[in-house]
Image: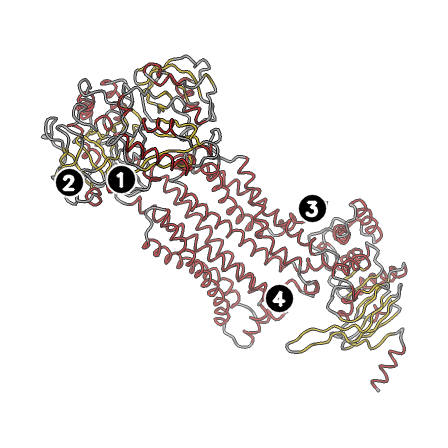
Amino acid sequence: MIDIRNLERSYKTGAGQTWVLRRIDLKIDRGEFVTLMGPSGAGKSSLLNAIALLDDQWLGEYYFDGDPVHAMGRKQRAELAKRSMGMVFQSYHLLDELTVAENIDLPLSYKNMPRAERQALVADTLDRFNIVGKKDLFPSQLSGGQQQLVGIARAVIHNPALLLADEPTGNLHSEQAKEIMELFKELNRQGTTILQVTHSETNASYGNRLLEVRDGWLVNDSSNPRLNAAQESTTR
Amino acid sequence: MELGNDLRYAWRQLRRSPGFAVTAVLTLALGIGATTTMFSVVDQVLLRPLPFDHPSQLVAITEASYEKDAATSGGGISLPDAEDWQTRSHTLQAVAYYTFNMPIVGGIDHPHSKPQLPSSANFLSTLGVQPALGRGFVATENRGAASHVAVLGAEAWRTLLNSDPKVIGRTITLNGTPHTIIGVMPESFRFQGGSDFILTPLDISQKVIQDRSGGVLNVIGRLRPGSTAEDATREMAGIKQQNLRSYPGKERDTRVLVENYARSLTRSVRPGLLTLNGLVLAVWLLAAINVAGLLLTRTQGRRREIAVRAALGAGSSRLLRQFLVESFLLSLVGGALGLAITSAALRVSRTYLANTFQNGDTIHIDANVCVYVLVASGVSALLFGILPALQAAHLPILTGLREGSAGAGTSRRQSMTRDTIVTVEVALSLLLLVAAGVMARTLFEMQRRPLGFNPEKVVTAELMLPQKNYWFVSAGPSNAKSIVTALIEPMLIRIRQLPGVTAAGVTTVRPLRTNWTFLDEVRFAGHPKPDPHHAQNTNVRAATSDYFRAMGVSLKEGRLFSADDSVGAPLVAVVNETFTRQIDGARSPVGMQIEASEAGAHKYATIVGVVADARQDMNESVKPELLLNLGQMSPAVDDLYPILVSFHLDLVVRAQTQPEALIPAITRIVHDLNPAVGVNHAELMQTSVDDTMGSQTLAARLLTLFAVAALVIAAAGLYGLLAYQVTQQIRDFGIRIALGAQRNDVLWLVLRRAIVLISVGASLGIAASLGFSRIARSVLSGVDVHNILLVIEAVTALLAVTCITAGYLPARRAAQTDPMQALRHE
C-alpha cells in the first residue's frame, strides 16, 4: 500500500537547516497494524504527517497503492487523503460548535455526497460505535474517552484504507485507552490498515509491526531484520 | 444544502460569541444605516427623475448680469423674450413660462391665501403632464376674461374643496375674480416641491407684461431630440444679440443660461449633499474596516478549527465560502438594524428635510432603499470578510493542529495587516472628526452671530394683500388706493391701543423670511450710471417708522424715520451696516441720495440712518439692505410701490406680556378693515427663530454623531488589536519580568506601539483633512482657514487622548503579568 523511498524533511533555522526526517525507506502493506515509536523530537509525528499528506514539504518518493504521490499536485494529494485516509488526533480535535453527529458528518460534507446518503452513513457509524444516544450532544458534554471515540468514528466513516493515529490515547486514562486500542484492533481485523504513533509499550503491543525512529532516522523495523542488523553494526 | 449548513454553523458561531457579534453588528448597523439614510436623501433629491415626460429634455432658462455667476444669480425673463425663443428657436421644441402669486381664494368655506402659478397655455404640455380630471389650458385662454379658468394641484383640491369629485365647473374667486375650475392634476404631479397650488393662464394682454426690459417670468423649455443645453445656450445668446440690435435701450443686455431643469432645482443643495455623502461613506468604510480587524483576530483564534476542517478534506474554496457566509450573515443582520436606524433618522429629521430640499417631505424608505441596503450589506460583507476568509482558506494545517495552537503565534504579515487596519481607522476617524467639526463650527458660528434684532415678546404675522391682477401689475397711478392709508395706518393705530402693546410696525419683508426678496441696482445721485458689468445690488424693503422699535433693531448712525417724514416730504430711507461695508462709496452713507424711481418727486431717497444688521438668513452672511419709508410711499409716486407694497407685508407687534394672546385681536382688526386680507403664520418671532435654528442644529448634531461614532470605532479597534497582541505576548512579558524588567518597562513597551500606530494614523488623517478643507472652502459658505486649523488641532488632541487611553488598558494588563502564570501558560 505505502512505499516510501528516501523521504527527507527539513526546516530552515537561521542560516542552516534542521533535518527532522532522513532518508526514510519504508513499505507498509495493506492490513498491517504498524506502531511508530521513538523519543520526543525523533520525527515520529513528522513521518506520520508526511504519510497522512498533512505536510507536503518533504522530499523523496512516496507511492500510495502504486500512485506516485510525490508527482501529484496539491489538489490531487488532497483528494487522495480525503478518499483513502482517516486521522485520529491526540487532542481529539472535535469542533466544539458541532454536535456528535455533525462532527462525524464533517468529512462527508466535503465530498459532494447526497445528503440522504450522508445521513445513512452517519446513522450507521453512530450505531457501529454505540453512540446513537449521544448524537445531539456537544463535545463539551462528553468524557475524554467518548470524545476520542467520536474522533475515531469521524476518521473511519468514509471507510478509509489507511487510519493514522497520533498518540490516540495520550490524553486518556488506562481504562479508556484500553477501550480505544481494542477498537483499533477490531478495525484492523476488519481490514483497515493502521499506523499509530505512541510512547506506550502497551499500545504498541496491539500492533503487529514496530518501527523505531531516532533523530530523524528509521533505526528499527520489527519486520526488517536487515535494518536492525545494519544499525547494530553501525553502533558496534 | 451545504449553504444551509454553513448558515446554521455561522449562526451558532455568533451565538457563542455574543460580545463579538453585538460589537460587529452594531458597528455595521451604524455604517450601513448612515449610508442608507444618505442614499434615501440623494436618491429622492438628486437621482430620482422628475415626474414629467422625458425629464432629461427639460431645461430652465435664466438671465443674469455678465459679472455674476449666472448659475447663482439668475433672474426673471420678459414675456417678449420668452415668445421670441418659442418662435425662433431650433433647439427648443417648446418654451413655457410661469410666475407666482398669492391671492386670497374665495368661494370656499374659509377664504385664505393659496399659491397661484399664472402660466403659459402650453405649460402642462411642455412638462408632458395631463390633468387627472378635466382638461388643461388651450391657447385662446391667455387673454382677458378667457384666462379666468383654473387647474388645481391635488393638495389644493383637497384643502380647498375636500376633493369634491364634482369639482369641474365649480367656481372659486382669486382676489375677488371668479375662476372656473377646469381640471385637477394627478396626485403624482408635484411642482416646486408640492401640489398645493392653483394653475391659471397668464393674461398676456396686460401691458406691463409686454415690457421687454422687465423680467418677471420663470421659463422652462423642452429640448428637441438631439439638442443639448449648450446648443440652446448658444442659440439663445444669438437671439439675444439680435434683439439688442433690434430693440436698443429696451432689450436687457444679460447672459442667458440654459441648464438641465432637474439640476437647476438642486444646484444650491448639491455641493453640501455630496460632501455629506462622502463623509458618510467614510463612516461606512471605517465600520467595515473595524469589523475586518475583529474578524482577522477571530480567525487567528479559530486556527485549530480551520486546520481540522482542512485535515478532514475542506479545500480552500470551501473554507473561503464558509467564512464569507459568516460575513454575509453578520452583514445582513447589521443591514436590517441599519434600516431601522435609517427609518428613525428620517423620522427625526423630517422637518429639516422638508425645509431644506424640494420634495424633502416625501423622502422615505421605498423599494430602492431596500435594494440599496441589500447591496450595501453585500458589499460590506465582501469588504470586511474577504481578507479574513482568504487568511482562513490558506492557513497552514500543521500550524493549526499543533498542541495549544489556538494561541500559537502571529506571523509578521498578519501583524502588519492588523497594524495597517488600525492606522487606517485612526486616519479615517480623524478625517471624519475634522469634517464634522468644521461644518458644525461653521454652522454654529453662523447661528451665534448676533440676530440684529430682539425676538423676545414679539409676535409677527404675514399679511397677504388682495389684488385685482398680479403682483407686478400696477393699478394705475390715478385711481389706485394706497394700502398705506387704507390699511396700514388705521391697522397700526388700532393695534397700538391693544393692552400691553408697546410698539407696532409693518415691513415688507421681516428678518428670517427667506422666501421673499427683492434686489435692485444701487445708483447714487450725482454718480455716473454704473457699468452693467459692475452693478451693485441691494435688498430693497420698506418699513413704517415704528417697525425698528417693534422688532428691536438698533440705530447705529444718523436717525430713524420720524413724524417729519410725511407723505409730501422728500422720501427717506435707512440702510444696514452691511450696506455701508459692501457698497462702494457708501462707507458713511447718511445724507447720500439713492435712486428709488425713474422720475418724479421720489426719484431719489435720502439715506438718514444706518441700522444694525438684522439676520435675513441664519445660514448666510447678512446682505446689504435698503429700507424705504413705507409711510411716505404711494402708488401715484413710487415705482417700487407695486413690487414692495401691494402684495405681501409683515406685521410686527411688541408687547409687554404674552404677545401671542394678541393674535386673535390682531386678526380681527385686520379683517375689520379688509376681510379679503389673508393673515398667515401669526406666531411669536422667537418661534420662528427657534425653528430656523433647530433645523440647522439638527444637521450639525447628526454630523457630530457620525464623527463621535467614528471615534468610538477607532478607539475600539485600537483597543481590540492591542488587547489581542498582549494576549499573544503574555509569555514574552512573563520572561521579561522574570529577567528583571520593571512593570513600567512592559507598560511602555505596549504603549509605545500604540503611540506609533496613532501617530502614523493621525499624520495620514491630517493630510486627508487638509485635502478636505480645500474642498470644503470651495463648496460651503463661511468656512475659513482659521476655523479648519483650529478644528484639526482640537480633533488631533482628542483622538490622541482617546486612543492612548484605549491602548493604556491592555498595556496595564501586560504590566501586571505574573511571570509564573505566564510561563505555566507556555
The residue drawn where x is 58% and y is 67% is B412
The residue mark sitting in front, 2 or 3, is 2
C-beta proximity under 8 Å, tags 1 and 2: no
Q: Name the residue nearer the viewer: B202 or B103.
A: B202
Query: How far separated are the C-alphas under marks 4 and 2?
Result: 85 Å
Q: Is circle 1 on the same chain as circle 3?
A: yes
Check the image and tell me how it is coloured: secondary structure
Q: Name the residue nearer the viewer: B403 or B511.
A: B511
Which callout, 1 or 4, points at the residue further toward the start of the chain? 4
Q: Total number of numbered labels?
A: 4
Judged from the image, the secondary structure of the residue bearing numbered disc 3 is: helix
The residue under label 4 is: B409
Q: Residues within 10 Å of mark 2 (few under 14, many from 20)?
A: few
Residue type of the residue flagged with mark 3: Leu
Q: Is residue A222 above or below residue B429?
A: below
Name the side, left or right, on which B693 lies relative to B495.
Answer: right
Mark 1 — on which chain does it sit?
A: B
The residue under label 3 is: B3
Mark 2 — on which chain does it sit?
A: B
Residue type of the residue flagged with mark 1: Arg
Name the side, left or right, on which B516 lies relative to A7.
Answer: left
C-beta proximity under 8 Å, tags 1 and 3: no
Q: Position of residue B49 (x, y in %)?
A: 48, 34
Which callout, 1 or 3, points at the residue further toward the start of the chain? 3
Q: Is residue A100 above or below residue B804?
A: above
Mark 4 — on which chain does it sit?
A: B
Query: How far separated are the C-alphas under marks 1 and 3?
Result: 63 Å
Q: Residues within 10 Å of mark 3 (few under 14, many from 20)?
A: few
Q: Name the residue nearer the viewer: A205 or B206.
A: B206
Q: Is circle 4 on the same chain as circle 3?
A: yes
Residue B527: mark: 2
The residue under label 1 is: B615
